[in-house]
Image: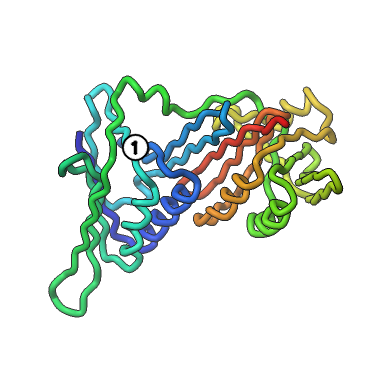
Amino acid sequence: MRFRAKIVDIGCIQHFSKVVGTIAKLAKNCILRITPNKLYFILTERVANGGVGIWCELMQSHFFNEYSMDGVSEEDNEIYLEVCPDSLTRSLKSAQNAKTVKIKLTKRHTSCITFEIELPSLTNQSRLVVHDIPVRVIPRRLWVDYQEPKVPDFDVSIYMPALKMLRNVVERMKNISNYVVISANWCGEMQLKVETDLAAITTHFRDLQNPVLDKGNTSQTSQSQQSRDRDVEEFAEARIDIRKLAQFLIGQQVNPDKVICNIVDNRFIHFFLLHEDMSLQYFMPVITL
């Protein structure tokens, strides 16, 4: 196996750092999947225990000036590594003003992802900072555990309001309850509701848009197809852990172009963040009381 990549553009370095920083806010450990065209960050927790799922895709051509890899074999030209995103983030902190960042798979006392960060200098001598981050190579027989999650058709899909505003609402609500019910319909309406024995508080968002989505893109279905099965004014809802939702909203550093909320009624919520050169899917199962 071999992997080597290089980033020169400072904007790409900073954007890559923000993507990794976002993943670090959501997962202590995850799988880094390396393919000839893309990098993936993957987390698959046990849904039965309230675990979340993450599927983040980065187009390597949008980030790296140089990129080469050889997988475990010619037929299976991929590499799967278990990594600690927080360690990656700490290493990239010194790269915010770097001239170049080289990333490669190395063998020290164990397998490592090595960052070689070239920093600007007032003299002719360059400064080089090297970080070796231990990783665990995932054997081929376990790859099946880290494929893109397959989900059933969504009951409602809706573009979310501004994340900053949503984050402020959720931050206040989490002081009231451990759970929040998110509901939406095909009329551009979305609600966040928390309940206690003494009160129920609901925040309403109106005049949002409902996307028309391609069935072949992340297993999503179109609005017209869903509307045949349910009234457009009928709400689909899911009760989820409000602290995990707050963690998801606070951790966003990539400023996505759009954020879509997909709801499978009383089963789970799927957040889909779209950016020009990356996408992030976040799956949260419902909490049954």
Q: Position of residue 131 (x, y in %)?
A: 24, 55
Q: Quadrant of the N terminus?
A: top left
Looking at the rendering, which quadrant does residue 233 occupy? top right
- Residue for point 44% across, 56% down: 18
- Specify whether 52 is left or right of 6: right
- Residue for point 23% across, 50% down: 132
- Specify whether 115 is left or right of 149: left
Looking at the rendering, which quadrant does residue 146 occupy? top left
Q: Quadrant of the C terminus?
A: top right
- Residue for point 27% across, 48% down: 133
Q: Residue furthest front?
A: 197
- Specify whether 256 is left or right of 88: right
Q: Please rate how many residues cluster around mark 1, counting C-alpha atoms within 10 Å: few if below 14, some from 14 to 19, many from 20.
A: some
Q: Position of residue 31 (x, y in %)?
A: 38, 36
- Specify whether 70 is left or right of 10: left
Against 230, residue 249 (above or below) is below
Q: Colour mode?
A: rainbow
Camera sees residue 162: no
